[in-house]
Image: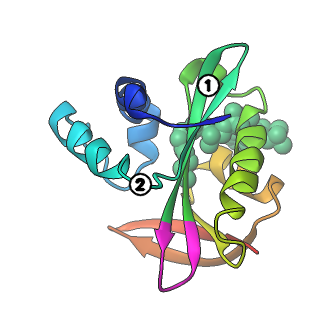
């Protein structure tokens, strides 16, 4: 596991545009290279909160933590490279990344939103010890809200 760096821009772009990742996202349209590089440029200044999982020198996926200052929590986004799904790596990656991220702000809790239809994601958060705390509608899409303190 390592922190994402500028040279990961293309890799993060490729992952973010995998059809399943766009399908499970709230904004489903493909991300343009222009928007992505602009986003990376802002994100990589300072503490970016993006972790890249590495297995046998291969990057397998990413976990991103967006800070919610008001709620004092980290909102999680996770996705794996298509070729590494279904091997239990999501749980390992999530646990390791949360451990690293928690050290930055020990008083923060973790929060995640998963579409009700996204069984793999719901199972992942349940296995990682998250509690389902509510059902919310975001951009017309129902999702479970998960929290872990
Ligand atoms: C979410 C994600 C990171 C999980 O990756 P993963 O760890 O490889 O997930 P798995 O395929 O092992 O599935 C996790 C669990 O869900 C179960 N599962 C997956 N798809 C399922 C389905 N259609 N029906 C029932 N169970 C399902 C698996 O059996 C597994 O449970 P188990 O460990 O108890 O057997 C990965 O699917 C991903 O990158 N998805 C696209 C992006 C995404 O949806 N991100 C989440 C946004 S909040």
Farthest left residue?
34
- The residue under the point 68% across, 48% down is 97
- The residue under the point 47% across, 55% down is 47
Q: Residues within 10 Å of mark 2 (few under 14, many from 20)?
A: few
Please provide percent x and percent y for residue 119.
Answer: 65, 48
- For residue 60, the mark is 1
Membership of 72 in magenta stretch:
yes
Element marked by disc 1: strand
Please provide percent x and percent y for residue 75.
Answer: 54, 65
Element marked by disc 2: loop
- For residue 21, the mark is none
Height in image: 12 above or below 129? Answer: above
Q: Give the quarter of the image for residue 107.
A: bottom right
Res. 146 visible in picture? no
Q: Is residue 46 left or right of residue 83?
A: left
Give the camera-side residue of 94 and 38: 38
* Mark sitting earlier along the chain (2/1): 2
Res. 40 visible in picture? yes
Q: Give the quarter of the image for residue 17.
A: top left
Q: Residues within 10 Å of mark 1 (few under 14, many from 20)?
A: many
- Write down the residue under mark 2: 46
- For the N terminus, the quadrant is top right
The magenta span reads: 67-74
């Amino acid at each position: 596991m390592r922190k994402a760096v500028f040279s990961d821009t293309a890799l993060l772009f490729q992952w973010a545009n995998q059809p399943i990742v766009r399908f499970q996202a709230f904004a489903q349209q493909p991300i343009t290279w222009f928007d992505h590089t602009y986003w990376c440029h802002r994100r990589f200044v300072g503490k970016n909160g993006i972790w890249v999982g590495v297995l046998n020198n291969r990057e397998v996926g990413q976990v991103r933590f967006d800070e919610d200052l008001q709620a004092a929590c980290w909102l999680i986004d996770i996705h794996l490279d298509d070729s590494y799904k279904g091997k239990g790596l999501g749980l390992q990656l999530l646990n390791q990344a949360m451990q690293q991220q928690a050290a930055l702000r020990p008083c923060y809790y973790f929060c995640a939103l998963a579409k009700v239809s996204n069984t793999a994601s719901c199972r992942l958060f349940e296995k990682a010890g998250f509690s389902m705390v509510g059902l919310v509608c975001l951009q017309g899409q129902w999702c479970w809200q998960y929290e872990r303190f």
